[in-house]
Image (tube, helix red, strand yellow):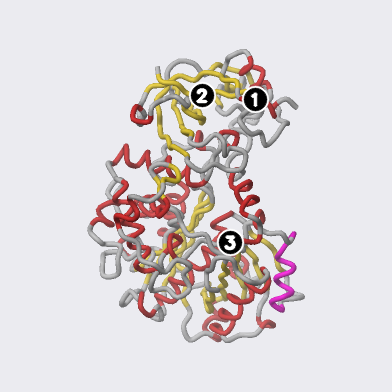
Amino acid sequence: MPNDVAIIGVGQSAFVRGYEGSIRELAFEAYREAMKDAGISNSDIGASIICSAPEYDKQRSPSGLIAEYLGLNPQPTFAIETVCSSSTTGIRVAYSLIKSGLHDIVVVLGFQKMSEISSADSQERMGRGADIMWESPFGTMMPAYYAMHARAHFARYGSTEKDLALIRVKAAKYGALNEKAVYRKGVELEQCLTADVVASPLKRFDCCANADGSSCLIMASAEKAREISQKPVWVMGLGSGTASLTMTGREALDGLNCARVAAKQAYEMAGVGPQDIDVAEVHDCFTIAELMAYENLGFAEPGKGVELIREGETYIGGKIPVNVDGGLLSKGHPIGATGGSQVRTIVLQLRNEAGDIQVPGAEIGLVHNIGGVGIYGNVIILGR
Amino acid sequence: MGFEKFGRVSFTAQTKAGAFVEYLEKGELRGTRCRSCGRVYFPPRADCSFCLSSDMEWFKVEGQGSLVSFTRVNYGPTGFESDVPYILALVDFNGTRVFGRLGKDVPEEQIAVGMIVKAVTSTLPGGQISYEFLPV
């Protein structure tokens, strides 16, 4: 297993509705926590990578502004964007900057202030998340696309709305334990099944919680990590894939091929398989996305993912605990910050610092982070 | 120009595949085929990513298709508020996949993955032009 690059500091703001501050202040919250965690100072940092989905930013080219506010001039800074998977793409870039020898320590800062723009502006941008020539003119939305994936999965494998509801019940149980989660209430099965239909078969509780938030990771070369850190967590494997943005270009809608491609690369690089993963964070922007992730990551055979949730195997104590920090569903999904937050959760798990949600003895963890409706897929395997 | 006539809400006017709208006006749904390597594209494209040729011809998407998946949308984005609910669908016409909407009058209990449909062109309020899927 490669031990070339480590994560030596992690931080995350609380994920909240309507953050009462500017994007620079939001970014600073995660940065301060990560820098204190790493025990280093600004001058130790070689470069910063700033990750956000720019359609939510009023500030043009926010990386310059944020690097200034974090005290990271005159080091290089630049933006990386793959919508909801921006910050794990940032990790991929940071890894290559460090492995190439160009920099020893790199900051990956993800943020999104979803409330920066009005609800009307947000609705307008939502419509343009698809191919604006060929699909947006029909009135497409993210929930509608994932709903079509759900319907295809149901038809092929016999999965049900109740299976999806079970996934939300799990997310809500753990979200209630996470003091940084935006949605901290429990959710009952019946509540999920009788909620407002957003895009059939997806209902209100099948959809993730909107939130403002930031995440920050400090990544370092092996030499620096050993010199500075008492508790480095190593990047064992990285995988990254894509699929067509248009639905017409997809072979099937019952899984995400970008995730399969990314998982295969990450497992090969790490020299481990799905059976070796002790704890996972997967991109549950909608409940169906978590179900597909079980299968696309190899935790279950295609069509057998429902057995994991029906039998409670993705709870703590089960075969493969998934999203025990509440996931995007309950913790919240501030687009540019999400991947970094998932990585933070796994790092804390592997350091045995996860508190109420600690998976006992976790040694190898996995992060699955998806951009758009399966356009971009990143899988990262971490080990202690 | 001209492509802004396609769809309930248009987001872009200019494309080299703009003849698509002229075909819709004649009641035809068409994609493009690369004259150089034979690769077939829907939605239509001006350029072939397989052989890099830009020598394309238009072919008709005809006959019966099978419903790959669908969803009934209850909350639409800006510009679609008065349309909801509507049903988005992906249909497979013998290997050519087409994204669109099912006809407004199709009863929901009749809709299922695998259902056989045809594509017909349609004129929308305001003179916009589109196509929709109807049960056969």
Q: At which x and y percent is residue B54?
A: 68, 26
User: Where residue B78 is drawn, which disc sits there?
Assistant: none
Magenta stretch: give its range.
Answer: A60-71
Is A225 in the magenta?
no
Q: Which residue is mark 2?
A: B132
Q: Which residue is mark 3?
A: A336
Residue depicted at 60% across the width and 34% down the height: A137
Q: Which residue is mark 1?
A: B128
Give the spatial CA distance, label 2 vs label 1: 13 Å
Residue depicted at 58% across the width and 59% down the height: A86
Dot in front, 2 or 1: 1
Location of residue A265 (image quadrant)? bottom left
As helix, strand or loop, the secondary structure at mark 2 comes to: strand
Residues packed near mark 3 inside 10 Å, few (<14), some (14 to 19) or many (20 plus): many
Residue depicted at 32% across the width and 41% down the height: A154
Q: Nearer the viewer, residue A1 or A287?
A: A287
